[in-house]
Amino acid sequence: MTGYPLPIRRLIGEFSKFPGIGEKTAARLAAFVLQSSTPDMERLAETILEVKKKITLCRVCYNLAEQDLCDICRDASRDRGIICVVEDTDSLVAIEESGGFKGTYHVLHGVLSPADGIGPEQLHLADLARRVKDDGVREVLVATNPSVQGETTALLIKRLLNEMDVTVTRIALGVPLGGNLKYIDKMTMAKAIEFRRGV
């Protein structure tokens, strides 16, 4: 962007690398940095560096962690007999915030997408199979998104665990609580009928 001094152009360029941040939003963020106090921006810079230095992946489930194990894997009250497989940590956080799941997790950090070079090896699926085999897991709940890639990944997990003594389940898909049927799209309605349950 012409008209800005070089350091501001560089800052706008760095902000533009963030997902969902275009050049105009990046310029607004740069303006915010300029208007903020130096101590506030020093704290922001220190926090960013702290995250990069201290956050790693849990050696068991691949959740974000400050130590070798994440908080969930260290929690002795969690049911280790059930593993919920999620695409990313945002999905894990959403499930945790619901309060409805008390087992452990396995974070894939993506979905199967051969065109993008993402295969079973990149998704830590061998580690999932090892956990099921070694840890006496009785259920694997697949909570990937209801996209083509999410569904393909769910089917791959089902096939991978087919020969093991474990129940593989899938999160229910369909009409949201409080939803109005006349506004539901065809795919969601089809899934709601497919995954119907007894009353």
Image: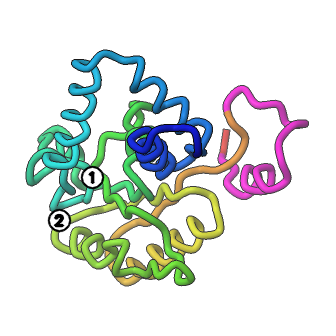
Horizontal placement of 168 versus 71: left or right? right
What kind of element bears circle 2? Answer: loop
Q: Real-space Cα distance between discs 1 and 2? A: 18 Å
Residue 180: quadrant of the picture:
top right
Q: Is residue 179 magenta?
A: yes
Residue 101: quadrant of the picture:
top left
Task: Give x and y (percent) for residue 130.
Answer: 22, 75
Residue at image position (57%, 74%) is: 152
Above or below residue 25? Residue 132 is below
Q: Which mark is residue 135?
A: 2
Locate the C terminus by quadrant: top right
Task: Give x and y (percent) for residue 173.
Answer: 64, 50
Q: Nearer the viewer, residue 107 or 56?
A: 56
Q: Which residue is mark 1?
A: 63
Which portion, as a residue range, is magenta?
A: 177-197
Horizontal placement of 58 versus 158: left or right? left
What kind of element bears circle 1? Answer: loop
